[in-house]
Image (cartoon, helix red, strand yellow):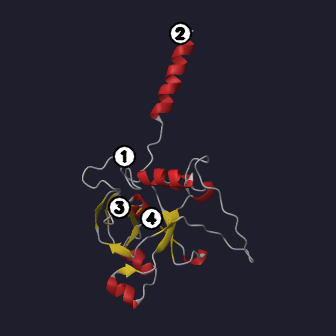
């Protein structure tokens, strides 16, 4: 009896220790949609949408479209470590509503370095040939405390900005117009090490 009680207590303790602290954006989509695209947990992952294709192509489905023009970020010491914006392709995701004293519960997409290894990004329509893959390098505030805005936003390094072949107008303004469509590189249960937390 004593051994059984101890085993049950240890099992309960282990499950409490391994519980995942999800970010505010993860919880936002779980509450809003009942699922999270690219989630590691199968019971929380949104199912793949049915898509019809007239020719065989690799299908991509993106969940997030930036709510504003996408700007480039400069070099620096980011949440995930130091990076060089001109030589490294990477992205900056929303760091959350609390900028002064952030907590795990207030973290946008990032709750520690690195939350996610990489994600895929596309400008305009998601066409497999135009998709870029880049690591998450930093967190940005995007001048918003709103989950409905911040959880969708993304900024890119100068190198990644240039890989999208910006127009002269975009180069001059430093903004990719029309936003980017992006998601974590773990759609439909593939590459779970890339899944959001």
Q: Which residue is mark 4?
A: 152
Q: Nearer the viewer, mark 1 or mark 4?
A: 4
Q: Which is in the foreground here, disc 3 or disc 4?
A: 4
Q: Position of residue 161 (x, y in %)?
A: 40, 77
> Spatial distance from mark 2 to mark 3, Cα to Cα?
50 Å
Residues at marks 3 and 4, CA–CA distance in whole angstroms: 15 Å
Q: Mark 2 or mark 1, which has the lower sequence index?
A: 2
Left or right of 125, for residue 111: left
Observer-nearest residue: 185 or 85? 185
Q: Nearer the viewer, mark 3 or mark 1?
A: 1
Neighbours of disc 3 within 10 Å: few (<14), some (14-19), many (20+): many
Quick one: SS at disc 4? loop
Mark 2 lies on residue: 2
Q: Is residue 190 left or right of residue 23?
A: right
Which residue bears the numbered disc 3? 138
Which of the 4 quarters of the picture holds residue 25? bottom left
Where 184 falls versus 102 (above or below)?
below
View extreme (left): residue: 100
Counting from the top left corner in percent of width and height, residue 174 is at 34, 81
SS category of the residue bearing label 2: helix
Q: Earlier in the sequence, mark 4 or mark 2?
A: 2
**Are dots 1 and 4 in contact, CB under 8 Å?**
no
- Disc on the earlier residue, 1 or 4: 1
């Amino acid at each position: 009896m004593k051994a059984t009680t101890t085993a049950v207590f240890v099992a309960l303790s282990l499950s409490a220790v391994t519980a995942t602290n999800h970010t505010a954006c993860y919880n936002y989509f779980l509450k809003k949609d009942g699922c999270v695209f690219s989630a590691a947990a199968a019971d929380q992952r949104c199912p793949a949408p049915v898509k019809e294709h007239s020719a065989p192509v690799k299908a991509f489905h993106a969940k997030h479209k930036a709510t504003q023009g996408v700007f480039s970020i400069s070099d620096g010491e980011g949440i995930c470590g130091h990076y060089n914006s001109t030589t490294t392709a990477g992205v900056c995701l929303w760091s959350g509503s609390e900028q002064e004293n952030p907590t795990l519960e207030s973290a946008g997409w990032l709750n520690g370095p690195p939350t996610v290894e990489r994600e895929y990004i596309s400008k305009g329509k998601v066409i497999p040939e135009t998709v870029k893959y880049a690591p998450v390098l930093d967190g940005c505030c995007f001048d918003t405390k709103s989950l409905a805005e911040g959880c969708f936003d993304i900024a890119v390094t100068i190198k990644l900005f240039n890989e999208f072949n910006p127009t002269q107008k975009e180069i001059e303004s430093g903004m990719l117009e029309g936003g980017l469509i992006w998601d974590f590189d773990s759609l439909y249960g593939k590459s779970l090490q890339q899944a959001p937390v």
